[in-house]
Amino acid sequence: DQQVKQNSPSLSVQEGRISILNCDYTNSMFDYFLWYKKYPAEGPTFLISISSIKDKNEDGRFTVFLNKSAKHLSLHIVPSQPGDSAVYFCAASDPLETSGSRLTFGEGTQLTVNP
Amino acid sequence: DSGVTQTPKHLITATGQRVTLRCSPRSGDLSVYWYQQSLDQGLQFLIQYYNGEERAKGNILERFSAQQFPDLHSELNLSSLELGDSALYFCASSPPRVGSKNIQYFGAGTRLSVL
């Protein structure tokens, strides 16, 4: 049962344009959502996150939108830069007391930004 | 640099063997998580430790075990290895949750190849 899904394995955009990466989830208990970026031969790097009580969080060129009724979140990158080319993972947090929470990851979307 | 250190970076071994993967969390983080990423798949949660105690288990095989030591470093032990165990193994650490906020910081991973 895939609780977090990224339906687009790949996305290609032109430099300077907007990149929109999508993610859907099924578990209504998720209370925190994160986006990670991953370059080859490196571990995932935290990018941006959003609490389930908010619908938008912005950090520089990156904005995450959350639509709880649709169980959908998206990551917008504006403007896109060639250095943004990487695999982007959506992750959702399932609360487990105060000691931390497991993350459930989507399969990832390979973003390619063309110069 | 996330502050999470994993060793070794690469491991090549044969079927039936046993290996140990090591992880040092970020300074001050009490939670350690282990994830497995098989080819072209998302990260699968294996197990979490908090301050030396097991806190959560995911889809971890019985042939796999982990522990967290008093100095908070963790080891993941994989035994009776099979070809299908070839994967990237990531360790992550996190500070205690504040509200719903839970950000995990990942190491660079250990690439295990079982021949």
Image (cartoon, coloured by chain):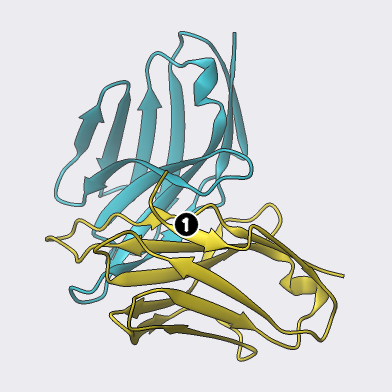
Chain colours: A cyan, B yellow
Please say if A16 is above or below A48: above
- Residue B59 visible from this viewpoint: no
Amino acid of disc 1 = Phe
Rendered residue at 48%/68% (across/down): B23
**Residue B67 lies in what quarter of the image?**
bottom left
Where does residue B39 sit, x and y in percent of width and height?
A: 71, 56
Residue depicted at 59% across the width and 72% down the height:
B21
Query: Which residue in the rendered view is the most extreme toward the front?
Result: B71
Q: Secondary structure at mark 1?
A: strand
Whether residue B60 is situated above or below residue B26 in the rendered picture: below
- Closer to us: A45 or A92: A45
On the image, which quarter does residue A76 sit in? top left
Using the image as rendered, state which of residue A35 and residue A22 is in the foreground: A35
What residue is at 27 percent from the left and 22 percent from the top?
Answer: A60
Image-based side of B26 in relation to A111, left or right: left
**Dot 1 corresponds to which residue?**
A105
